[in-house]
Every structure is written in structure tokens, then in C-alpha cells.
Image (tube, rainbow, N blue to C red):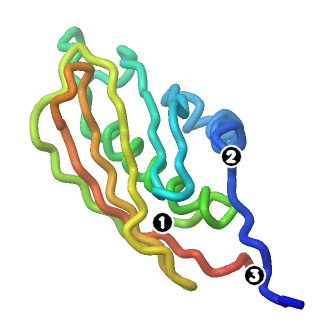
Amino acid sequence: MSTAATPVTLSAEQVQQAFDKSTFIAWLGMRVTGIDHDAQTLDVEIPFQNAFERGSGTRQWHGGPLAAVIDTVGDFAVGMLVGRGLPTVNFRVDYLRPAIDTDLRAVARVRRLGKSIGVADVDLFNSQGALVAIGRASYATLPPA
């Protein structure tokens, strides 16, 4: 008889519920469009909102919402494998081209899932499929105290 604990994972519906439960994340309007536990990927769509504009009337995404999306999608890519949202330890974003008048798609891939730290890479695409930003983040995976 095995004493190993069965891993607790989150379904796409559970990740979406977590998004919707957070006032800030709900404001971002993110929608889970794909989840693959075996490939350790999470796919999310984000509709453009005027509140995200870098300058009034430009329809260009401000970097702040892009960073928030990258952090959140990376968090839940790792979190879907451990059954909960996780605290961010560190993250970085590289902005590659302006995102103008477009919805976005974020694709996160877990690069490492360890006992204490998980790492995810996130690619952010515009509606034409061009890569607009990339991010990498680490999250604390230790059980809650």
C-alpha cells in the first residue's frame, strides 16, 4: 500500500472560478481557453479594455496590465498542478512590440515544479499571433503554513 499523497490539481473550471473570485483578476477579464496537466500548459484569452490604454484614445496596452496577466497566468499554470494559487517570488517581463487595438492570448508553460519553487514561462500574443511580450516567474510551492 502506497502512502504517497495523490496530487491535487485544478481543472479549467476551477482556475476560471479563482480568476472570477478575485476582484482585480476579474477586472482583467481573463478567460481560460485551455489547460493541459500533462504538458503543464495553461492558455488564457484577455479582451482589450479602454482602461488598459497606455494613453487615452491610443488603444495601446499599458505595460502594467500585460505584466499582471503574465504574473497571474504563470501563477495558475504552476498552481493548477498543486491545487491552489501561489505567492509570487519573482518575475520579469520583456516587452517585444506594442500591443495595439487587439485582444491577447497568454500561453504559460511550467518549466520546473519543485517542493519549494515552481517556475513558469509565459508568452503573450496579439490577435494576429505575433509575440508581444514574454515573461518568466517563480512561485512558492511550499504547503501553506
In the picture of the structure, the residue carrying the numbered disc 2 is 11
Q: Quadrant of the C terminus?
A: bottom right
In the image, what residue type sits under mark 1?
Thr
Q: Quadrant of the N terminus?
A: bottom right
In the picture of the structure, the residue carrying the numbered disc 1 is 88
27 to the left or right of 49: right
**Which of marks 1 and 3 precedes in the sequence?**
1
The percent position of residue 75, horizontal first and vertical second, equals 50, 57
* Outermost residue, left side: 97
60 up-or-down from 105: above or below: above
Question: Which residue is located at x 28 percent, y 46 percent?
Answer: 123
Tell whether label 1 touches label 2 (CB within 8 Å): no
* Residue nearest the observer in this picture, 66 or 105: 105
Q: CA distance from mark 2 to mark 3?
A: 24 Å
In the image, what residue type sits under mark 3?
Ala
Badge 2 density bin: few <14, some 14–19, many ≥20, Cα 10 Å? some
Question: Which residue is located at x 57 percent, y 85 percent?
Answer: 115
The percent position of residue 17, horizontal first and vertical second, equals 71, 37
Question: Which residue is located at x 36 percent, y 64 percent?
Answer: 137
Q: CA distance from mark 2 to mark 1?
A: 21 Å
Quadrant assignment, res 68: top left
Q: Which mark is residue 13?
A: none
